[in-house]
Image: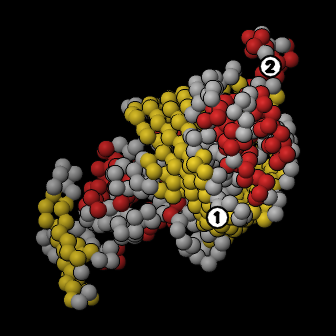
Amino acid sequence: MDSDAEWPVRLGFRRLLRQDARVTAGGILLKLTITVFLMYGCLPAHGEPYLAIKTGNPCSACHVDPTGGGMRNSYGVYYGDVELPATPIKNIDYADYGLVTDALGIGSDVRFNLDNESPDEGEDKRGFQLLSGQIYLAIRPPKVPVSIYIDEQVAPAGALNRQAFIMLALGTDYILRAGKFILPYGLRLEDDSAFIRQATQVNFHSSDIGIDLIAQYSQLTVNLFVTNGTQSPSNDDNTLQLGARGEFISQHWRLGASAIHNDADIGARTMANVFGGFTYDRYTFLLEHDFIKDESRQNIPGTASEIFASLAELNIALIKGYNLKLTTEFLDPDRNIDENEQTRYSVLLEYFPFAFTQLRMGLRVKDGIPQAPEQNTHLLFGQIHAYF
Amino acid sequence: MNQKNHHHPEPQQKSWRIASLAGLLLLTGCAGSGEGLDENGLPVGNADTQTPERGTLAYLQANIFSPVCSECHTGSNAPFGLRLDSEDNSFTFLVDVSSGERPELMRVNSGNPDQSYIVMKVEGDPSIVGGQMPLNRTPLSAELVNELRVWIADGALRFPPTGPAVAIYIDAGNVIKAEQTSNISAAINPETFNHHIILLDRLKSVDNRSRPELARRKL
């Protein structure tokens, strides 16, 4: 990645907009489109995986973290303020509040829930939850190819560092990052409770420490990474975890695969997946299948666990600002054991009424073996999500 | 796309909609019947099918650690290396082990539930780092949290005490004498002791489940 070329797009978008006070929204969009097209050779996109697939762009088009999620870059902020909401922000010049200087950006996400969980047996549980409060910080001194990204969870309860890494731009196509990061693996869903994120243990609460080489070509993104494989501040043995992720991105579809191998002392763990999606008209379809072989988990003595998890998601853009999301999930916690499979179905309505705000409401139905009450629940929830 | 299309989809769009939903349904699996499995989804023949006694690690394993915690805290990639997928692992990685988030606190401080980080995490104590456990899920019931507290207050033993008890005499950290006593009705296996807590006596029952109150001293 060319540091001098890309950084103005990421943190200097606000300045770009201010160059002409009489600029029109159409003119801004044209400039933006041209700039991003020059960067990526395709049209602009953003945040959640379905948005990236819908618009045919890599996650880095909207996020500071090149593997997606967390702090949005200037274009990501623009998209969230103008393109997503039913009522977009009118004064676009002030859209990117988080851009303090060209070298310093801040961002935040806060999610607040009201949940009502109904087990098939037993009493309902309901209550408010401050699900998470995130603060993001991106620092990049001018004229150097190094930048710093920090993702700190500040609520609920005490602060927890999710990510903190150094990014070194190596030419125009490569980034080397070192530090604590969420492993690049499959689709980066926001929902950590999805089977594919829970079973793989790759989610927003399971970052690891290591290095990640990212190659970003026009339609291909490749990650090669080495980490401790412990999800803790230090390694607990002499082995390291190896992983790779590749994704081919087209205008209307994408296809990728990931693999991770952790040859830990307590038992090797190997997992792989294929993922992808396509978009047609108002419909965006996502799919991921994961397979995990874990010698450190032996539900049957002497036999490594073999886990299978999958997700299929259909997003329907109803009208501007409204998205209907349908998902089906499947989990086989151990293929060596019969009749232990679990499913989860979700229906969610996502509404972006205005800039910085998302309202979500939905129903998740979990079905599992009858003798496990926690596997058989209905969760009805509403969520307010504010993002900056 | 114009507004008209939203309200009056073309036949091609209808077909696509139907095909998308059909595709979604085709990828749907079925939940298992649970036949031949225990409540943790394991074959009945592989596990101890006896209902564990309340106040024991086995009870916590069956009701908290296996069904809830081990969805994430399992295997070589368990968060902070904390594996809660079996009684042995739960005991090994919890009792008198420093927490990853607040190393000055033990995950389970034997005899001191208020100073045990796992209790703080499941209760959502303001002093914890990160989120309340189970993460992004409905908190544990007060009843289950109390079971955890009781187990810790009772010394966080690996196995429940059974049979006749012994009295243990210690000098400079070495067991110099262990003798069975006639007036105490609990067996004690010194090998199952936490490394710095010695059970000296069982004085009285404190609740309707006849859970004994334990006298302890630190070495």
Relative side of A173 to B210, left or right = right
State whether residue B135 is above or below residue A378. Answer: below
- The residue where tag 2 is placed is B1
Residue A31 visible in this rendered orientation of the protein: yes
Q: How many marks?
A: 2
Q: Amino acid at mark 1?
A: Ile
Query: Residue tagged by mark 1?
Result: A166
Question: Can you say whether A196 is above or below B192 in the image?
Answer: above
Q: CA distance from mark 1 to mark 2?
A: 42 Å
Under circle 1, the secondary element is: strand
Chain letter for the residue marked with disc 2 in the picture: B
- Residue B51 at what x, y percent from top left? 38, 51
Q: Crowding at label 1, few (<14), some or many (≥20) Cα neighbours within 10 Å?
A: many
Colour scheme of the rendered structure? secondary structure
Q: Report whether B79 appears left or right of A264.
A: left
Residue positioned 82% across, 28% down in the render: A280
Identity of the residue drawn at 68% across and 43% down: A15
* Residue pictured at 75% horizontal, 33% vertical: A28
Residue A47 lies, in percent from the top left, at: 67, 41
Quadrant in the picture for residue A169: bottom right
Q: Is residue A323 left or right of residue A373?
A: right
**Nearer to me, B191 or A113:** A113
Residue A253 place in picture, x, y as percent: 83, 39
Chain of the residue on which disc 1 is drawn? A
Of the 4 image quadrants, the one containing the N terminus of chain A is: bottom right
Between residue A39 and residue A324, name the one nearer to us.
A39
Query: Residue at position x 60%, y 35% from top?
Result: A94
Q: Which mark is residue B45?
A: none
Q: Secondary structure at mark 2?
A: loop
Looking at the picture, which amino acid does disc 2 mark? Met
In the rendering, at what x and y percent does residue A127 appear? 39, 34
